[in-house]
């Protein structure tokens, strides 16, 4: 699978020109969207899409059977994170949208720069990643038996943000800093005709003493 170009770089520069930087690779991906169901022979539900580094996949739309009216329509396929439309654009048959990774989902960068001794006790720095957005539920469908609109596929959960990083530059390190650098959890999948999948958790960050 080809991931989107989502590497994100962040940099801090001090007054004396000393720089630290970090790139968030964003290698974890969102969950796949589920497929929609069919309501008539010869028609099909829409196909869900795979998750990516930016989002969970959209769910496929539900197929439509108009019964005695003789109208039949396939469910629409999902595109990217967007769920597919129901067959014939009928109500309650659209696929759920996939959850997205937030623009600022990663934990960021903190640089502690001191010319004196550094003591890390009596405090905690938190740069955890944000959780991925949950996928939306697919439409529940309408009608009994073979007539009406079929249930649609749910959207995949979004990928969690990466944990942030902490840099410390000090004359002397007396005690280390306590930092929370865990990645955010992947989003939950939406319900639907077939199973959608949760997003992957973001990887943890780190603390670096310079």
Image (cartoon, rainbow, N blue to C red):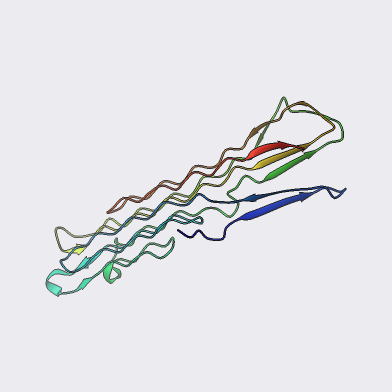
Relative placement, left or right, of 141 versus 84 is left
- Residue nearest the observer in this picture, 130 or 91: 130
Horizontal side of residue 69 vs 94, given as left or right: left
Which quadrant of the view contains residue 46? Answer: bottom left
Residue 23: x percent and y percent? 65, 51
Observer-nearest residue: 132 or 166?
Answer: 166
Q: Quadrant of the N terminus?
A: bottom left
Quadrant in the picture for the C terminus: top right
In the foreground, 147 or 10: 10
Q: Is residue 96 left or right of residue 5?
A: left
50 or 136: nearer the viewer: 50
Q: Residue at x 49, y 49 (%)?
A: 159
Q: Which residue is depicted at the point 72% across and 25% down?
A: 121
- Percent across and percent down for residue 24 are 61, 50
Residue 66 coordinates in the image, percent (x, y)? 17, 70
Q: Is residue 146 above or below residue 165?
A: below
Relative vertical location of residue 206 with respect to residue 155 in this rendering, above or below: above
Give the residue drawn at x 15%, y 74%. Answer: 69
């Amino acid at each position: 699978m080809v991931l989107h170009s989502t590497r994100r770089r962040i940099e801090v520069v001090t007054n004396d020109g000393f720089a630290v930087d970090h790139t968030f690779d964003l290698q974890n991906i969102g969950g796949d969207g589920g497929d929609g169901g069919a309501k008539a022979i010869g028609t099909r539900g829409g196909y869900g899409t795979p998750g990516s580094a930016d989002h969970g996949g959209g769910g496929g739309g539900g197929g439509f059977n108009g019964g005695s009216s003789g109208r039949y329509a396939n469910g629409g396929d999902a595109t990217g994170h967007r769920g597919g439309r129901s067959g014939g654009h009928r109500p309650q048959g659209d696929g759920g949208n996939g959850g997205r990774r937030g623009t600022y989902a990663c934990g960021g960068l903190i640089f502690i720069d001191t010319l004196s001794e550094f003591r890390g006790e009596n405090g905690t720095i938190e740069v955890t990643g944000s959780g991925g957005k949950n996928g939306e539920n697919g439409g529940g469908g309408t009608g009994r038996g073979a007539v009406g609109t079929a249930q649609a596929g749910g959207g995949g959960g979004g990928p969690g943000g990466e944990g942030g990083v902490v840099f410390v530059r000090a004359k002397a390190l007396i005690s280390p800093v306590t930092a929370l650098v865990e990645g955010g959890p992947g989003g939950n999948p939406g319900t639907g005709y077939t199973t959608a999948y949760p997003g992957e958790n973001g990887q943890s960050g780190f603390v670096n003493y310079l």
